[in-house]
Amino acid sequence: MYFTPEGRGSFRSVSSFLAVLALTGPIHSVLAIPASVAAPHTKRALDVPGLGVELEVAQIIYEPKGKKYEDMDQERREQLKGAIITPIGFGRDHPKENWEITAEISGTNKPFTEIIIDGRKNEIGKHGTQKLGEQITTYMGDWAPCRDKECKVQIEGFAEYNPWDVQWPRQETKFDQLRNSPQVTAAMPLEGLLQVLKDGKDKKDNVLANKGQSYNDKIVIPTKDSFKDFGKIKEDDITDEFLGFFSLLTTYCVVAKDNDERNGPKRSLNIMPRTDFLGMYKKFIEEKLRAEISECGNSLYTIVSTVSGVADDKLKDYEFKWKPDDLRKKDDQDWDGKEDMVKKGRLRVDKFLDTLQMNDKVAQKQLDLLKLMDLLTRHGQIGGLNDRMESVVEHPTLPAPIFEFRDLEAISGGEVAKRMGEYEDKAIEMHKKAKTDSTAIALADAIERVAGMAKRQDVASPGECKPKVCPPGEVPLAATGMCVDVGPYKKD
């Protein structure tokens, strides 16, 4: 459940609202709390934070009986992804709580096994994930001997192909010895996400961080000093939550330069946002940048470009890439240049950021084009949950975006239970990094109202606009702060 502003009352002026605040508590105490504390608050409890796990077991594959998988068309193959698999003649006396055996696909290879713990039913903080891992190990271990018999399964939604033959590894191997490639999907506050990104960059032990991938060196970890050129961004608003968002957003933009079109942007970093960037931007960031953007003429792109450290304003030329001939889907959103972008499988970083902000100089709609391009060209996993968030552990009104942690260290079947427990323990630890000051949360709605009324009445925000720093060969216009080619302004 999520808070929406419909039906909320309003005050006719700031002064009348302050009069009401005077009856409820000290005004100076309310106004002393920065907007950053208020922004994440919701009036109603969110869904509890979940933790899902995917275990890819590529050595256990499936072939339709009497038919060839290669003859199945691409659209039908795509529908196999996530379809539930049920062993025939096995499993009735083995518990399966909140997990299933499903099918996974990869290119032209035959479908293989992916074991999924359902994050919608497995709550972070209940310490039940290790138990599910124990169930998985027992179930798969007891099913494995069917390799010596006629081992068959049914796949849900594929009655015309059932039953399927199960092809186990040629050499007799216990499940305990099989390689499991894990992915974890979990709600996580941005403060915790920042820590995972730091640990990945610094190659520190963290079961949710990747080890050994080249993109780790490109992770951008901003600090308060990274925003020193933007005087209208309040220092108190630059919290770990703020930095976590900008670390993820900026890193995605930086690594776009090298992303492989065969995999799309989702494989450019081991953290993939399932909550879309637009939902996070509007919930946690937009209000904190409003003065910098409206009064100083800067943009989200300007800020990200500066934070990125990419020289000479070259970040705008970086592109997110997808294979142009990948899966085609339809959506009802439209934007300038859509047809050409989808046809080429390319999205410029500046176009993405300007549209995310809805920079009115170049964008007419506020959209998450990274999400929409991924939907139109691949499986729509990046931002596929739209603006959905869940709660922080033990704080039901504080929202936590949902992320998928990929390229994690592979484990054997015998290590599954222990590692499942470690995933949950680390998620709990990361949730504890969220700022949960109870007084600030209680006053959040009041501060949001003050901020909204000040905005409507054009009240100037504190801080000063810093001199615009433009790329070589450009100068800032005094009226708007926009950087333009210096040519027309040269003196004879």
Image (spheres, rainbow, N blue to C red):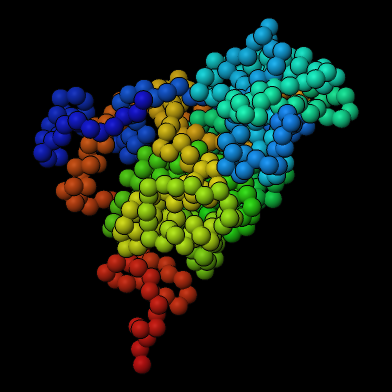
Residue 163 image offset from top left, x and y in percent: 69, 24
**Residue reaching furthest to the bottom:** 492
224 relative to 213 in the view: left or right? left
Residue at 70% across, 16% down: 88
Viewed as shown, does residue 460 lie left or right of 307? left
312 or 378: nearer the eye?
Answer: 378
Residue found at the far right of this picture: 171
Res. 21 visible in picture? yes
- Look at the picture and state if 411 lies above or below 133: below
Asked if residue 27 lies left or right of residue 65, the reply is: left
Residue at 83%, 18% (x, y): give it: 149
Between 75 and 338, the residue placed more toward the observer is 75
Query: x and y percent of residue 151 in the render?
Result: 77, 21
Q: What is the quadrant of the C terminus in the image? A: bottom left
Name the residue nearer the viewer: 123 or 338: 338
Q: Residue at x 28, y 58 (%)?
A: 295
Judge whether 201 appears above or below 424 on screen. Answer: below
Q: Quadrant of residue 212?
A: top right
- Does residue 196 appear in this view? no
Name the residue: 71% across, 27% down.
164
Q: Position of residue 62 (x, y in %)?
A: 73, 30
Task: Count the labels in the image.
Answer: 0
- The x, y position of residue 368, in whole percent, is 42, 48
Q: In the figure, residue 296 lies in which quadrant?
A: bottom left
Which quarter of the image is occupied by the N terminus?
A: top left
| Quadrant of residue 491 within the rendered picture | bottom left
Tell me: residue 189, above or below residue 202.
Answer: above
